[in-house]
Image (cartoon, rainbow, N blue to C red):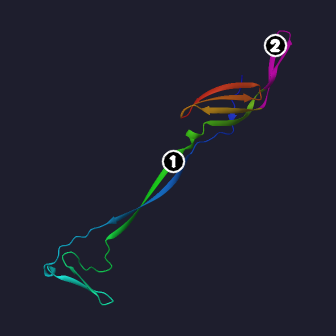
Amino acid sequence: MKILMMMLFASQAYADCTTQVGQNETTKTTVITTDVPSHLKGATIIVRLANGKETTAPAELFKVVPRKRQEIVLEKTQTVNTVCENEAAQRRNRISVLGGRGPVGGLDISRSGDTVSVQNKVGAIGGLQYQYKLTDRFNVGVQAQTSKTALISGGVDF
C-alpha cells in the first residue's frame, strides 16, 4: 500500500493593492451681484491717475471694493483610487516539492514449506508536482515520485 506524500512547499495567493492619486484644477468665476445703494444712483466715480489724468464712470456700472476681495477662485480637488489586483487570478502555475516515507524497492518473496513471506523496503522518498489553475476554483496537475510512481491530480480551491 502506498503512503500519501506530505507537501513541503506550496504557493500562496495574496492581494496586491496600489494607490493612484490624481489632481484636478478648475477655475471658477464667481459673479457677485449687489444692488446700487440709493445714495449712489446717478453718481459718478472719478479716478485720478498718477500722471494727473482723470477718468469717470457711472456708479450704476462700476463699484469700488476693497483689494482683499477677489472674484476668481481656483479650486483643487484630489482623487484617490485604490486598485487591488488578486495575484491568484494572474498566477496560474504551481510547483510543489514533496517528501515523505514510503516503499522504495520491489517486493522480497521467500518461501519455506507451506509459508510464503512477502516484504518490501520502506524509506524516504521525494517527488515533484506541477499544477495548473484552470479557473478560479479548479486545477489539474501531474506528480512524479522517486518510488517510480506517477500521478495525475485534479483539485478544487475553497
Q: Is residue 84 left or right of residue 27?
A: right
Indicate the secondary structure of the residue bearing disc 1. strand
Query: How far apart, in angstroms, are the residues tagged by discs 1 and 2?
Result: 65 Å
Which disc is residue 96 wearing? Answer: none
Q: Quadrant of residue 54?
A: bottom left
Q: Is residue 111 above or below residue 154?
A: above
Q: Is residue 11 above or below residue 104?
A: below
**What x and y, as percent, mark residue 86?**
54, 43
Taking depth in this image into account, of 3 and 94 the one nearest to the observer is 94
Marked residue nearer the N-terminal end (1 or 2): 1
Which disc is residue 84 wearing? Answer: 1
Q: Is residue 106 magenta?
A: yes
Taking depth in this image into account, of 29 and 14 the one nearest to the observer is 29
**What x and y, as percent, mark residue 60?**
18, 76
Q: Is residue 41 left or right of residue 137?
A: left
The residue type indicated by label 1 comes to Cys
Magenta stretch, overall SS:
strand
* Residues rendered magenta in the picture: 104-124
* Residue wearing tag 2: 116
Taking depth in this image into account, of 62 and 115 the one nearest to the observer is 62
Q: Residues within 10 Å of mark 2 (few under 14, many from 20)?
A: few
Residue at position x 48%, y 52% in the image: 82
**What x and y, as percent, mark residue 98?**
71, 34
The residue type indicated by label 2 comes to Val
Q: Is residue 107 magenta?
A: yes
Q: Is residue 27 above or below residue 88?
A: below
